[in-house]
Image (cartoon, helix red, strand yellow):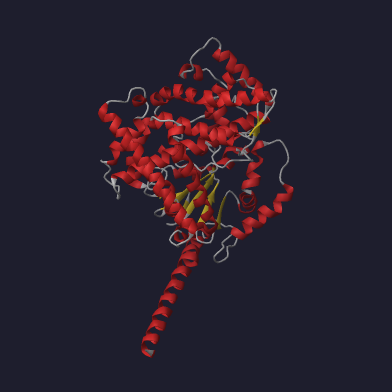
Amino acid sequence: MEKLLEIVVVVSTILLGLALVYLYEVLWLRLEKIRKKLRRQGINGPKPTLLYGNTQEMKRIRQELKCVQRQDKDMNGYISTIFPHFLLWRKTYGPVFLYSTGVLEILHVAQPEMVKDMGHWTPSELGKPQHIMKSRKPLFGLGILIANGDLWAYEKKILAPQFFVEKIKGMIGLIVDATVPLLQSWENMLNSTGGSQKIYVDGYLRNFSADVIARACFGSNFIEGKDIFCKLRQLQKLISQQDTFVGLSALWKYLPTKRNWEIQMLDQEVRLLILDLSREHRSKSRSNAVTHMSTYDNLLHAIVDGANQCPSYSSAPEDFIVDNCKNIYFAGHETTAVTATWCLMLLAAHPDWQERARAEALEVCCGQTVLDIDVLRQLKIRLSGCTLRASLIMREALTDIRLGGVDVPYGTIIQVAISMLHLDLEAWGPDANEFRPDRSRMELLRRASRPHVHAVRIRTKTVHRAKPGNGRAEGSSCTPAEQVLILIVTWVPTLSVFR
């Protein structure tokens, strides 16, 4: 018995020692190798600590700046609220610097030539970070927002044609159909309170965006797909709570916690709902029972057909369907809802532009009974151009690569703060920080043609959009007819994942 106990103790000690060595390798030695290679090239950053990296310093900077947050009317001040540490570190170390989360070594890039060079590498060489693929798997699976390499190329081939201009033209009528009930509800609220009412638009626009993506891509509507959207949002909130552990969240999911159990249950419920939707689609297609909807649910049809032909998908065809439907639901629902919310906030904060947008809408729509692509093309005040402020994109060097003369070692996470590049005065001129929806496409192209600016004509491959402010806007004085036009212009399908 004593010998057995000794063996157990020895084996346990060995296993514990191996575990500690592995953690030391993952949490320090591997990251230190990356830091040394980049520091030798003149790239520096704040000094990290074991386990925490620079996360404690990030919290300290945010806490210190809480009392001195900008209080002016510049709506782009959200950068100093969300990313104060980036602004401080950029000022200290330059546009390219290193920082650590404890398990990830991140190369922050705000240098145009390096951003430009990112587009020269394939998704197999510079792809989505592995830790995001693992920690977000219940939310995205192996869909197009997460996939790399051949799988991403195949999913792009299947999905991208469904968002070409000709297909988007056919969605305008569906967007109008989804917009009218929303504006009628707002009008009823205003009428019941004497014409003045605060409207917390988050929930309304989230449901509106869900309704549009359901009608345009899946041949249903928000009521029919409500369970899918609600459960995906619950899943998103639960998974985001794991981010406290940053890179360790991929390991945390294996622990038998209540949160992990809830995530698994929600994931299964969403899976069953999507499979039911796809089976219903197949049944209607076989019986030729689809009339109006068959024109618009080509995306679901493409996903279902592509599931049986994917050469590089390691899971069952049903997983391909579920994963890519999740991705389209999420990308077309959440990001566009935030964009529309931010657009209305900007209009509320800039009443002069609100008046100009209203006058143009009245002029363009004068005598028109149907909104179509020709009507939208007449608009010169492009609200969507000022609202598509991406927050961050992150890529992982899946092999040793070179960006702007810098040798970036395998395993480095490369981060680009798109919102900061959008507001770079040196790149875009002294009015880069201003809300100017009248900027013409030619003006932007002219500015972007400068040698030092060319790189920041953004070609993002995955979009992580932050919601600046609290997402609230007081009801504007636009009439429902004008707001239909505004919401149509701001509802922009998320195409950037295909680039």
Please indicate whether residue 345 sits to the left or right of residue 416 in the image: right
- Classify the position of the N terminus by image quarter: bottom left
Q: Is residue 442 left or right of residue 67?
A: left
Comparing 491 with 22, the one in front is 491
* Total count of labels: 0
Is 496 on the left or on the right of 469, as rendered? left
Which residue extends farthest bottom?
A: 2
Compared with 328, 136 (above or below) is below
Q: Residue 170 at what x, y percent from top left?
A: 41, 23
Residue at the extreme front of the image, as rendered: 192
State the residue at coordinates (57%, 38%): 422
Q: Which residue is nearer to you in this view: 489 or 436?
A: 489
The picture places residue 149, in percent across and down from the top left corner, at: 35, 47
Q: Nearer the viewer, residue 393 or 168?
A: 168
- The answer to whether residue 451 is left or right of residue 155 is right
**Residue 456, image x and y in percent?**
52, 38
Give the vertical position of 204 relative to 124 (above or below): above
